[in-house]
Amino acid sequence: MKLALILPPITLEERYNRAISYVAGSLPPLGLLSIATVLKNSGHEVILLDGSLLTLSDIMARIEGFSPDIAGITAMTIMWPKVKMLSARLKKRSPSLNIIVGGVHASIVKEGALSELPDIDAVAWGEGEFSLLEYLHNFPGLESAGPIAGIAYRLKNGDIVVGPEREPIKDLDILPIPDRSFVELKKYTGAFEQYKFLPVTNMVTARGCPFKCTFCLPDLLGEGVRYRSVENVMREIKYLVEGLGVRDIAFWDDTFTLSPQRVFSLCESMISEGIRFSWSCQGRADCVGPDMLKIMAKAGCWKIFYGVESLVQKNLDTLRKGETVEQIFKAVGMTKNAGIEVEASFILGIPGETYQDGIRTITLAKKLDPDYAKFYYLSPYGELKKEVKKYGCFLSDNETSFTGSTIIFVPYSMTKEELRSLYNKAYLGFYLRPKMFLRRLRKSFRAAELKKSFLGLFVLSTFLIDYLNTFFKRQAGSHK
Ligand code: B12
Ligand code: SF4
């Protein structure tokens, strides 16, 4: 069977916002890579078209040349309208092309996608490797195939066959290592804070997260956490570093530091096998300790990302983050002591958060002093989305606005102007500090870092312009 796996065309400006797009970047779509490899190994002919790098006309031209039987489209929420547009274009070009949609947003809406998107034939939720394999196995005889786990599909008479839940893949080692020949690795530069050295790429060593933060979707790929074995992870690292010349790996596990024992084993293997590369990962403040951080640094870890969210305890509790402000300060201090850089992200506009709370988070963020800080407006996903209207004004249901860089929710506890002013104040206050200038100056001896510094300054100037604009408008308003 011939299959084209597609991430819809989306620019960095559409993914984030104009200002952030200058320092943003993208890395390969790991979900599609994993699926492509499983299908290829089963004898299917597969191409992967990544709309982070390709335009709509590039994609249509590649489809024209390849003439697939099936198109599999992936999408996060922000890409959902693009799926609608792309599926319509594809169907118009070739009415017999079968279109299946999967990924994050499809896993939220499940069979509802079939009524939302008239041009798609099927939708898959959760892990896609074996669902899609089974779908292909039954294709083109779907009319008599019966339910397929993890998939809902349309019959010719318009009826919909909804399959049961698919069991999460228990042993991740049965999955092949994602074959990077489906993409041009060197074309991906990653965002500012995603690499220290180029070429950089991404991989995952586990799936799932045991925590239940209200704004998140921890069970997307199935409940609970599943780990790949250390040997299996090491094979992928060697393939990337020794085989493909990758110098930096971003581990995209939800919480890489979840199991201390496993982190130790992984780091010990990286050290003893002498593979030279830098890497970064995502951690939680309550899942790190000094010994763990020390061995991570020794194994090449240069940065840990912490989703801090807020530095006001009541707001952390509202989000059911399960961490204390004290733990966050301690974890960041320990990470820096181990010689690892820190990236922290913060959410502004949490239900019940006041303007003063926001100011306190910004002030404390400066005290916390991570190397990189990102500030987001609350984009309610998960549990919070269902009840968000209880806590404030929900300004837009349009999926494209769920970027975290657009205001779509304003809690009753502050005004929209206050929220916007907090966002600009946060970026300007955090980055326009002598300490940050000195830090960047020290790094800027390397060409890649110098470029980052210039782009960073440019982005800050756009925040400054927006801040001044809002300030003068408010002044003019108060003189009327
Ligand atoms: C790494 C990561 C990032 C990275 C890079 C993301 C990127 N740009 O691609 C960074 C740090 C930059 C990032 C940023 C953001 N992220 Co993010 N991120 C992740 C994370 C942790 C891992 C993604 C991943 O690669 N997973 C591993 C692969 C194997 O899984 P997968 O892609 O889902 O694919 C599987 C299935 O979905 C399915 N599948 C996928 N596609 C298809 C297609 C077909 C046809 C089929 C059949 C099946 C199928 O099969 C695959 C294999 O089993 C996820 C959480 C998670 N655990 O997935 C969040 C996640 C994707 N991010 C999320 C969010 C909200 C964001 C932000 C908007 C945060 C914010 N500011 O508010 C930003 C903005 C992103 C942007 N604008 O592009 C949400 C998405 C929510 C949503 N409804 O869209 C997630 C789910 C986390 C959460 N909050 O719950 N993110
Ligand atoms: S925010 Fe992080 S810790 Fe919380 S549920 Fe999501 S992935 Fe897990």
Image: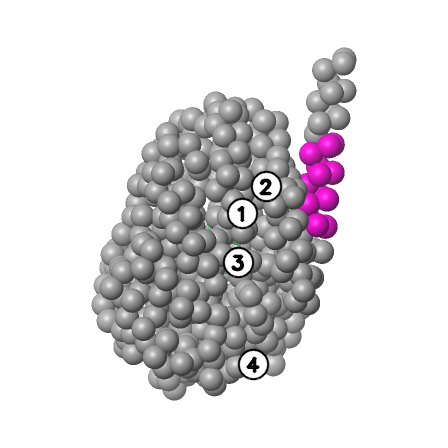
| Residue of label 1 | 373
Instruction: Say which element carries label 3.
Output: helix
Kind of residue at badge 1: Ala
Q: Quadrant of residue 54?
A: bottom right
Of tags 2 and 4, the one toward the viewer is 2
Mark 1 vs 3, N-terminal side: 3
Give neighbour class at mark 1: few <14, some 14-19, many 20+ (Cα, 10 Å): many
Kind of residue at badge 3: Val
Q: Mark 2 and 4 residues: CB-CB less than 8 Å, in contact?
A: no
Label 1 to label 3: alpha-carbon separation? 31 Å
Mark 1 vs 4, N-terminal side: 4
| Residue of label 4 | 66
| Residue of label 2 | 430
Q: Quadrant of residue 206?
A: bottom left
Taking the magenta stretch, the answer to whether it contains residue 467 is yes
Instruction: Say which element carries label 1.
Output: strand
Q: Quadrant of the C terminus?
A: top right
Which SS type dominates the magenta stretch? helix
Instruction: Say which element carries label 4.
Output: helix
Does residue 214 lie above or below 26 as drawn? above
The picture places residue 426, in percent across and down from the top left corner, at 58, 37
Mark 3 vs 4, N-terminal side: 4
Kind of residue at badge 4: Phe
Residue at (56, 24) in percent of width and height: 415
The picture places residue 251, in percent across and down from the top left corner, at 42, 65
Q: Mark 2 and 1 residues: CB-CB less than 8 Å, in contact?
A: yes
Give neighbour class at mark 2: few <14, some 14-19, many 20+ (Cα, 10 Å): many
Q: Mark 3 and 2 residues: CB-CB less than 8 Å, in contact?
A: no
